């Protein structure tokens, strides 16, 4: 389905308007019609960005953010069975993921983790609000091939920087190496440079492709 079709615009608009029941009905209909699950998530994400803008303009309050989060969580639940790919049982690598300290946004991180699992990765998810020392200790304990940090608020950038320093210090002490990738709504290459991550991606699927590429070069 093209980006400009009326149904497409309709889905992001319905998410932005917090029309929970209608969103879920439309998502189910489109899945049944064979629409691409990731396209559906991307369109809902567009609606989430609009929710954020309405919050900034004072048109929505925190309750609106909470509601939108709930809608997207339900959408992801509907979409998930359509994403599962037949796996040949081969584990491609282990990825340690988490949302950095002070940040409780987890929908994007969960989508990234879910897509990684569907593509044959073993995912260890530390959850949200993960302190730098906890991240680093878990990395030493689980020896991941890749570490992924998520963060959606401005304060997360400083925390990503601290987390990456802690991860690198501990990895060095234990003679471990793993690339660190970051993601989340406002992340770009300038932020990647600032926090000292190895890579960033604008969306979860690009993150999965990056992980595949990083591990195929080992
Ligand atoms: C839903 C939401 C919430 C929900 C979150 C529910 C949950 N369980 O996650 C709740 C209500 C908890 C919330 C709280 C707050 N929020 Co909020 N929230 C949002 C909103 C509307 C949507 C976020 C979202 O889920 N988007 C959909 C997902 C799928 O997108 P995503 O996370 O970007 O993930 C995609 C990619 O980035 C990528 N990805 C994500 N992580 C990673 C990691 C890796 C490694 C990789 C490879 C990829 C990847 O994959 C995903 C799919 O492609 C955004 C608006 C926005 N523009 O994002 C505001 C927003 C992030 N929130 C904001 C604010 C201000 C807050 C609060 C401070 C509000 C308050 N006064 O309490 C609190 C902060 C709480 C905290 N300490 O963290 C601001 C942040 C502004 C800023 N500059 O800091 C935003 C931008 C809204 C705005 N425009 O003002 N929020």
Image (tube, rainbow, N blue to C red):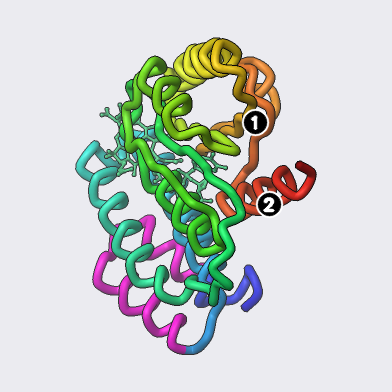
Residue 170: horizontal and vertical position, in percent? 51, 14
Horizontal arrangement in the rendering, residue 185 relative to residue 215 (left or right): left
Whether label 2 touches label 1, CB < 8 Å: no
Horizontal arrangement in the rendering, residue 132 relative to residue 58 (left or right): right
Q: Is residue 10 magenta?
A: yes
Residue 126: horizontal and vertical position, in percent? 35, 36
Residue 110: horizontal and vertical position, in percent? 40, 49
Q: Give the residue pinned by disc 2.
A: 212
Q: Residue at x 24, y 45 (%)?
A: 66
Q: Quadrant of the C terminus?
A: top right
Q: CA distance from mark 2 to mark 1?
A: 12 Å
Q: Residue at x 52, y 42 (%)?
A: 95
Q: Residue at x 47, y 38 (%)?
A: 96
Precedes in sequence: disc 2 or disc 1: 1
Mark 2 closeness class: few <14, some 14–19, many ≥20 residues within 10 Å: some
Most distant residue in the front direction = 174
Q: Give the residue pinned by disc 1.
A: 179
**Range drawn in magenta:** 9-32
């Amino acid at each position: 389905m093209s980006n400009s079709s009326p149904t497409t615009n309709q889905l992001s608009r319905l998410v932005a308007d917090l029309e929970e029941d209608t969103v879920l009905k439309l998502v189910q209909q489109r899945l049944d019609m064979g629409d691409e699950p990731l396209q559906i998530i991307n369109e809902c994400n567009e609606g989430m960005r609009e929710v954020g803008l309405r919050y900034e303009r004072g048109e929505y309050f925190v309750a609106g953010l909470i509601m939108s989060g709930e809608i997207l969580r339900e959408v992801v639940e509907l979409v998930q069975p359509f994403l599962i790919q037949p796996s040949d049982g081969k584990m491609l690598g282990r990825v340690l993921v988490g949302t950095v300290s002070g940040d409780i946004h987890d929908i994007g991180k969960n989508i990234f983790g879910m897509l990684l699992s569907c593509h044959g990765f073993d995912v260890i998810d530390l959850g949200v609000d993960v302190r730098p020392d906890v991240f680093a200790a878990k990395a030493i304990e689980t020896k991941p091939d890749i570490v992924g940090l998520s963060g959606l608020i401005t304060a997360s950038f400083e925390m990503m920087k601290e987390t990456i320093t802690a991860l690198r210090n501990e990895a060095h002490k234990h003679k471990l190496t793993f690339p660190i990738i970051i993601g989340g709504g406002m992340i770009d290459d300038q932020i990647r440079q600032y926090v000292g991550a190895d890579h960033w991606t604008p969306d979860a699927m690009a993150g999965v492709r990056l992980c595949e590429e990083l591990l195929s070069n080992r």
